[in-house]
Amino acid sequence: MKSLKRILSLWVLLIVTSWATTQGAQPKYIFYFIGDGMGLGQVQVLRTYDKQYGVDGEMHFYQFPVSGIVTTYSADNEITDSAAAGTALATGSKTRNGMIGMNADTFALKSVAYDMQSTGRGVAILTSVCIDDATPASFYATQPSRHNYHHIALQGAESGFDLLAGAYFRDPYGKRAKVEGNVFDHYAEAGYTVVRGRDGYELPLDASRVLWLDADSTTENRIGYAVDGDNGDMTLPQMVRSSIDYMHKKYPRGFFMMAEGGAIDHMGHSNDPSGVLREIEEFDDAVRVAYEFYKQHPRETLIIITADHETGGLSLGVEGNGLPALGNVQYATVSKGEFGDRLRQLLQQHGRKTTWSQVRELMADAIGLGDEIAITAGEEGRLMVAFQELLDNRSKDVKTLYASFDNLTNEIYKLYSLKFGMGWTTYSHSGNPVPIFAIGAGADKFDNEGWLDNTDIPRILRALIGRK
């Protein structure tokens, strides 16, 4: 027993000593993880699930030694959008909702990624959504509108960053912008080698720069949702792993990597409980890949995790439903969007002859509702009313930022959330604060007794690398 206590004491001392030696150091390798839409509620869902069903011994980002709270308001609204929040996280300046890389007076700003580049570090920008989406774009582009997708994509080519990776472009040929152009020509001229899908898991070291896009360009706004299973899509953890291998071999003197878990936001907009849980799990897995790198280079590596804003107004615990039942996620095989698509196909196939028993079978197969997840007669009756209204064309669709759902699907997922013990207040963003977690060289600089603002994060990063 004494020898066991001695071993445990030495182990704790080793961790504390390792942590202490990183304080005040200038990091060579900087990981900046942004969970889009990941508020305190989302993190608490992950924490509760891991407490109940997690693997012993795994390190999760919420266990990092430095943690705090971050405010997210924009220059013109207490509830920010991703453009203003991304700009704040990238540049250290507030701006109005909808603007990218500019302050409220449309003055172009420089992101911390360019500061990293100026120190000789390599720069990688990764996202699980489209590469010209608001958050990744804030690190390389300056535009008065986040919807200037074609021009944002062009500025990505002009950035000279070593690696840009994401789903696809929203306007690669200028159709929405009503201009003639092919962004891929600009990337080729700028020295980028294009790789697609899982072929990028072995990034070409002989390429001076890499543009890594998903193989499926029809789902331009994401690489694939985690809850929908393995459909041959890229995954954020593997993107981070491959990018670390590429960047470390090319830039052993140091690199900066921003990695966004963009689909957490999509699931929040949809109020999809299993979708949110699976996306934040995958985000945690991606951070764990960087943590493994940190363990090999503890005195030289900094990992920061935060969010641009919270989406959905998510809370854990709803009236009358007792303890959270997050284990219900095991029955989910599809996202809310995929469920809606399957319901639509069912209605197209059978029309007004579609029966409630067919819908009930779909619920059971897709998310376990009405089968492994029990529902009461009253709950089923309310869903049957929504089903009849849908058949009679008497219901209205519910539109969110990224999708539109028939009202039956929406009512099914309201009940589904209740069965998880998860509540929502909105299909949009909330003004709730978001967390920050950090570990490694210089992490103590983010340890604030009060709340941080999102603009403080790039300011601290600049100070750590000797830039203002």
Image: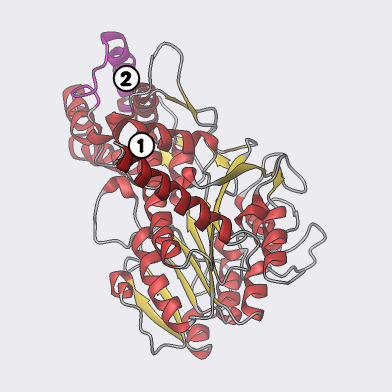
User: What is the magenta range?
Assistant: 369-390
| Relative depth, front residue between 406 and 122 | 122
* Quadrant showing the C terminus: bottom right
Q: Nearer the viewer, residue 22 or 344?
A: 22
- Quadrant in the rendering for residue 271: top left
Q: Position of residue 3 (x, y in %)?
A: 31, 43
Q: Position of residue 409 (x, y in %)?
A: 35, 31
Disc 2 packing (10 Å; few <14; some 14–19; many ≥20):
many
Q: Is residue 340 left or right of residue 41?
A: left
Whichever of labels 2 and 1 marks the residue nearer the N terminus, that label is 1
Q: Residue at x 76, y 69 (%)?
A: 108
User: Residue 399: in sight, yes or no?
Assistant: no
Check whether the beta carbons of the residues at disc 2 and disc 1 lie within 8 A of each other.
no
- Magenta stretch secondary structure, dominant: helix
Secondary structure found at label 2: helix
Residue that badge 1 annotates: 50
| Residue 376 within the magenta-colored segment of the rendering | yes
- In the figure, is residue 94 to the left or right of 409? right
Element on which disc 1 rests: helix
Q: Identify the residue under disc 2.
A: 383
